[in-house]
Image (cartoon, helix red, strand yellow):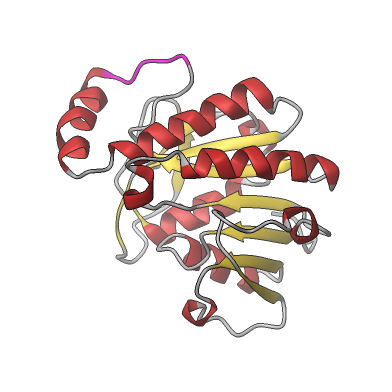
Amino acid sequence: MTNSQYTFLVFGATGRTGRHFVSIALSEGHKVVALVRNPEKIEEQNPNLKVVEGSITDYTALEELLIGVDFVISMVGNAQLQKLENVNTDFVKKLIPAMRKQNVKRFLYQAGGFSRPYKENLPLMFWVLKNTMVRFSGLLGQHRDNEAVIEYLTEKAGDIEWMVHRASIISDDASKGILVRSKTKNSIATFIDCAMYNYRLLTDNSAIHTCDLSYYKK
C-alpha cells in the first residue's frame, strides 16, 4: 500500500475475516464504511469508521453508500440462505451498476477455495473434496453462488477492476505467515492472514480480473 488514505466499503465487516480486515485498514490510517446487519457487533471505535445498518439482501441506497469510496470488498456468506438462493449473485448484480454510476472501479470478492473459476475445471482432489466434505457440510450452495458471481463478473463486468480471492480458511488462530497468490497452490489459512492478503490484493494491479487461490510462502 502507498501512504495515501483510501476509503474502503466493506460488506461482511462483522464476519470472521471482515472484522480483521476492518481493523487492519483502520490501523493503516484508512477510512472504512461498513454495511452490517447488527451494528452492535462492531467492536472498533475509530473516527475513520462509518457503520451503516443494513443487509445486502434489502439495502437499496447503494449509490449513496459508494460516494467517496475507492475500493469495495465483499466477504459475505450465509450458508442457510445460499442453499436455495444465489444471494451474493443477486447483490453483486445490483452493486456493479451502482459502482459504475459512482465511478468506483475496484472490487474484491472473497469466494471459497472450492469455487470453480469460470469455464475451468477444479483439480481432481479439489473436485473430490467438494463433492464429499463440502457437500456433507451443507456448503455446496455457497460455492454455487460464488461461481455464479464469478461468471457474472467475467461476462458482464469487464470494465470493473474486479478480483476474486478463492480462500481456504479454517481457524481464527494467530498469523501463520504471509499468503501469496497462485493459480494452483493453496493453504488452509487463518482469518487474520486472509484479511491481510485481501488488504494487499486490493492495490495489486496484477490481480485485476484474476480468480486465484492463496498459499503460505515459505
In the depicted structure, whether residue 110 falls above or below residue 149: below
Q: Position of residue 185 (x, y in %)?
A: 36, 30
Q: Position of residue 152 (x, y in %)?
A: 58, 27
Instruction: Identify the magenta region.
Output: 119-123
In the depicted structure, whether residue 27 falls above or below residue 210: below
Horizontal side of 160 relative to 53 (left or right) equals right
Q: Position of residue 99 (x, y in %)?
A: 76, 44
Residue 50 position by quadrant? bottom right
Quadrant of the drawing holding the N terminus: bottom right
Task: State the residue at coordinates (60%, 23%).
Answer: 154
Quadrant of the drawing holding the C terminus: top left
Q: Is residue 212 magenta?
A: no
Number of dots carrying numbers? 0
Task: State the residue at coordinates (48%, 31%).
Answer: 212
Residue 186: in sight, yes or no? yes
Magenta: main secondary structure? loop
Residue 211: in sight, yes or no? no
Residue 114 position by quadrant? top left
Horizontal side of 53 relative to 40 (left or right) equals right
Q: Position of residue 178 (x, y in %)?
A: 44, 51
Between 78 and 185, the one lying in front of the other is: 78
Between 65 and 214, the one lying in front of the other is: 65
Task: State the residue at coordinates (65%, 36%).
Answer: 162
